[in-house]
Amino acid sequence: MNSVMSHPSERQVAVSATTIDPATAAEICQVSEADVADVEKAVRAARAAFERGPWRRRRHQSEDVCSTVSPTLYTEVKTVTSKL
């Protein structure tokens, strides 16, 4: 564990964790530990993006796509798994 700068607040963070690629065991990056204030800030930003952004409309679009694709996908999955 080491100190890193936390984005976006740029405050010093005392704890971080190393992210390891399971395929190669190579270090990918260091991830800073979040505190309650960090999480609350992220939740507020996500809520604001959802409320004011295009995300509300996209939910319905996603449901339409899933409704259209799911019967075909289900049939394909049954076909593939029956051959196992």
Image (cartoon, rainbow, N blue to C red):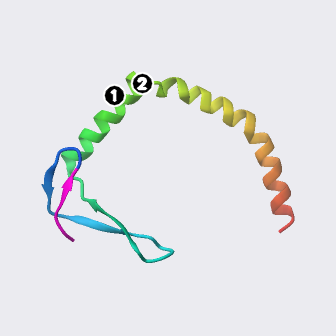
Q: Is residue 13 above or below residue 64?
A: below
Quarter the C terminus occupies: bottom right
- The residue to which callout 1 is attached is 48
- The residue to which callout 2 is attached is 53
Residue, x 33% and y 28% (percent of image)?
Answer: 48
**Spatial distance from mark 2 to mark 1, Cα to Cα?**
8 Å
Residue 69 percent across, percent down from the top left? 74, 38
Q: Which of pointers 2 and 1 lies earlier in the amino acid sequence?
A: 1
Count of marks placed on residues: 2
**Residue 4, magenta (yes or no):** yes
Residue 39 percent across, percent down from the top left? 26, 45
Residue 60 percent across, percent down from the top left? 59, 26
Identity, as a three-letter code, of the amino acid under mark 1: Ala
Occupied quadrant, residue 83: bottom right
Position of 69 with respect to 30 (left or right) is right
Q: Secondary structure at mark 2?
A: loop
Q: Is residue 34 above or below residue 81?
A: above
Mark 1 is surrounded, within 10 Å at the Cα level, by few (under 14), some (14 to 19) or many (20 or more) other residues, namely few
Q: Is residue 40 above or below residue 52?
A: below
Residue, x 54% and y 28% (percent of image)?
Answer: 58
Identity, as a three-letter code, of the amino acid under mark 2: Gly
Of residues 80 and 31, the one drawn nearer to the viewer in this rendering: 31
Q: Report the disc number at residue 20.
A: none
Residue 6 percent across, percent down from the top left? 21, 52
- Report the magenta residues as a range: 1-6
Q: Secondary structure at mark 1?
A: helix
